[in-house]
Image (tube, helix red, strand yellow):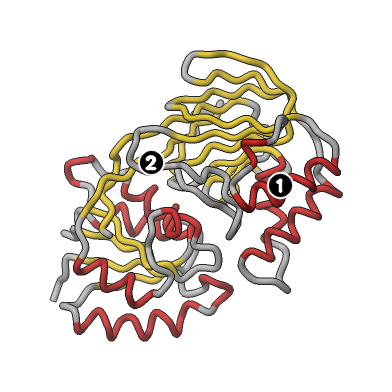
Amino acid sequence: MHHQILFVFNPIANMGRAWPVVANLRRVADKLGGADWAGTVYPAHATEIAEKASSQGYKVVVAMGGDGTIHEVINGLMAVPEKERPALGIVPIGSGNDFAYSMNITKNPETALRQVFKGTPRPLDIGCVQDGTNRKEYWMNTLGMGFDAAVNIHSRSVPIFQGFMIYFFAVFRTMIQNYRPYNIQYNIDGKESIKKMLMFNIANGKREGGGFLLAPNARQNDGLLNYTYVDEISHIRMFSAIPYFLKGTHASLDYVKTGTCQKVTINSDLPLWIHTDGEIFAGFTSHITNLAIEVMPNAIQLIS
């Protein structure tokens, strides 16, 4: 029997702890009417599965994993023409689950699964980034450049911690190994400026890194993105800013600037380190110095 809902799950989400959770959730889904299931086995596999889902007759594609799984599923859905695009569901079973937090989706996987069957669709904005080689990628939560991205890259090699502590440890490592400012020429909705800065973050969601409230006032259906950048400052001042970013009060600091936008273009004097939803868009060997970022209003329907 072919169902209208397809669950795309990452069996190694949350450092391999997702598999037994998925096994239990399948039994719950069967009681609610049933669904089809597809596990990912290699990077970007969820993107391929989600892109094919429409032609296979699915009306809802559910990302079951962390932010990385949602990111891949969204890129697959955005490859489908809008009129044929399935709706998105989210069941958070990852380690950070930052975007689920932004969308007020419960951390309880079974409750979130039930909501997929009983919820209603609501519009969701999506971000789009394109580099100087015309490489394009979609994202739903945050896009970080500079210090922000370096922290994310280092977080992938911190096996002894879980969740937020991974990112907290990675902050210290970044301060020691990758603390460098960029000379950024940027254009925000037609207004051009040049600034030396340590990081530039564009957000659609509220939180990243399991606890850093980069954009506490962000809304995901207002047709706007939220930006935050940090001027060139000392190590001590950056370290002292961490509690502000955790509480979402960093806009009160005189070396932090925040605002909203629809489109941003970036030109950097140095190659940019970049992450999209925690996925590495450009790592420490990056050659990317130019980016164009914009919001895609109401691009996807989210079931919640």
Density class for disc 2 (Cα within 10 Å; few <14, some 14-19, many ≥20) is many
Q: Position of residue 79 (x, y in %)?
A: 32, 43
Q: Position of residue 130 (x, y in %)?
A: 49, 31
Q: Residue sitting at 36 percent across and 86 percent down?
A: 24
Tell me the residue that label 1 is attached to: 150
Density class for disc 1 (Cα within 10 Å; few <14, some 14-19, many ≥20) is many
State the SS at label 1.
Answer: helix
Report the amino acid beneath label 1.
Ala
Of 23 and 189, which appears nearest the observer?
Answer: 189
Q: Is residue 270 visible?
A: no
Tell me the residue that label 2 is attached to: 126
Q: Is residue 281 above or below residue 287?
A: below
Of 206 and 55, which appears nearest the observer?
Answer: 206
Q: Please say if the residues under marks 1 and 2 sit with CB atoms less than 8 Å apart.
A: no
Picture quadrant of residue 33? bottom left
Of 29 and 225, which appears nearest the observer?
Answer: 225
State the SS at label 2.
Answer: strand
Q: Position of residue 159 (x, y in %)?
A: 71, 71
Picture quadrant of residue 93? bottom left
Q: Quadrant of the N terminus?
A: bottom left
Q: Is residue 61 above or below residue 31?
A: above
Q: Of the two numbered discs 1 and 2 on the same chain, state the one appearing first in sequence.
A: 2
Q: CA distance from mark 1 to mark 2?
A: 23 Å
Report the amino acid beneath label 2.
Ile
Q: Is residue 271 above or below residue 209?
A: above
Q: Is residue 28 above or below residue 293?
A: below
